[in-house]
């Protein structure tokens, strides 16, 4: 009789250990998937920030070169996405620039700033949240 009870106890412990390991493996798979989603979203936000900064630099270069006299809208395209901008004159030396950026995956963001065409200073930088 002792022999049969020991076998039953070993089977019970084996089943319990297998259940615990199965639970740990499922937990790790779930954690991996959520981490991949987080990393993907973080990368999109990083690209959006990069596009905003590059768009601001690109528009600033255009404005500093004096090519803005009749410029109201424009588009700058890069490998990471596209940057659309609108320019409005505030006074004779200051223009208001509004940027709309979109990644190749379709995430969107916007930003705006005032630009002094005489000295190249950017002021009142504002960023909007993620739009898409």
Image (tube, rainbow, N blue to C red):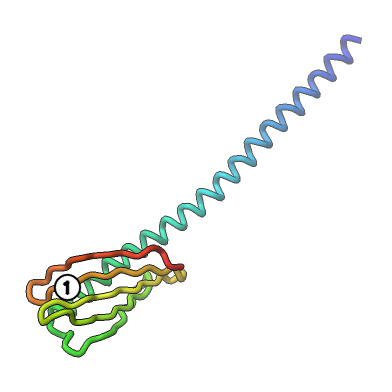
Instruction: Give the residue pinned by disc 1.
Output: 115
Q: Nearer the viewer, residue 127 or 59?
A: 127
What residue is at 83 percent from the left and 14 percent from the top? Answer: 6
Q: Is residue 116 above or below residue 25?
A: below
Residue 131 screen position, x and y as percent: 43, 67
Q: Residue lying farthest left?
A: 118
Dividing the picture into quadrants, the one containing residue 124 is bottom left
Q: Is residue 83 above or below residue 125?
A: below
What residue is at 26 percent from the left and 69 percent from the top? Answer: 54
Is 12 left, or right, of 119 in this rendering?
right
Q: Residue lying farthest right?
A: 1
Dividing the picture into quadrants, the one containing residue 116 is bottom left
Residue 85 screen position, x and y as percent: 29, 78
Disc 1 residue crowd, few under 14, some 14–19, many 20+, Cα 10 Å: many
Is 123 left, or right, of 81 in this rendering?
left
Q: Residue lying farthest front?
A: 91
Residue 97 screen position, x and y as percent: 24, 75
Q: Secondary structure at mark 1?
A: strand
What residue is at 89 percent from the left and 15 percent from the top? Answer: 4
What residue is at 34 percent from the left and 74 percent from the top? Answer: 100
Residue 39 screen position, x and y as percent: 45, 53
């Amino acid at each position: 009789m002792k022999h049969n009870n020991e076998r039953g106890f070993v089977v019970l412990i084996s089943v319990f250990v297998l259940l615990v390991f199965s639970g740990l493996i499922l937990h790790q798979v779930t954690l991996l998937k959520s981490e991949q989603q987080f990393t993907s979203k973080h990368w999109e936000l990083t690209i959006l920030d990069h596009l905003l900064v590059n768009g601001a630099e690109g528009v600033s270069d255009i404005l500093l070169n004096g090519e803005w006299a009749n410029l109201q809208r424009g588009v700058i395209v890069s490998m990471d996405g596209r940057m659309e901008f609108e320019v409005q004159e505030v006074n004779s030396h200051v223009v208001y620039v509004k940027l709309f950026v979109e990644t190749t995956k379709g995430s969107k963001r916007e930003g705006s700033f005032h630009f002094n065409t005489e000295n190249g200073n950017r002021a009142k930088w504002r960023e909007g949240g993620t739009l898409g």
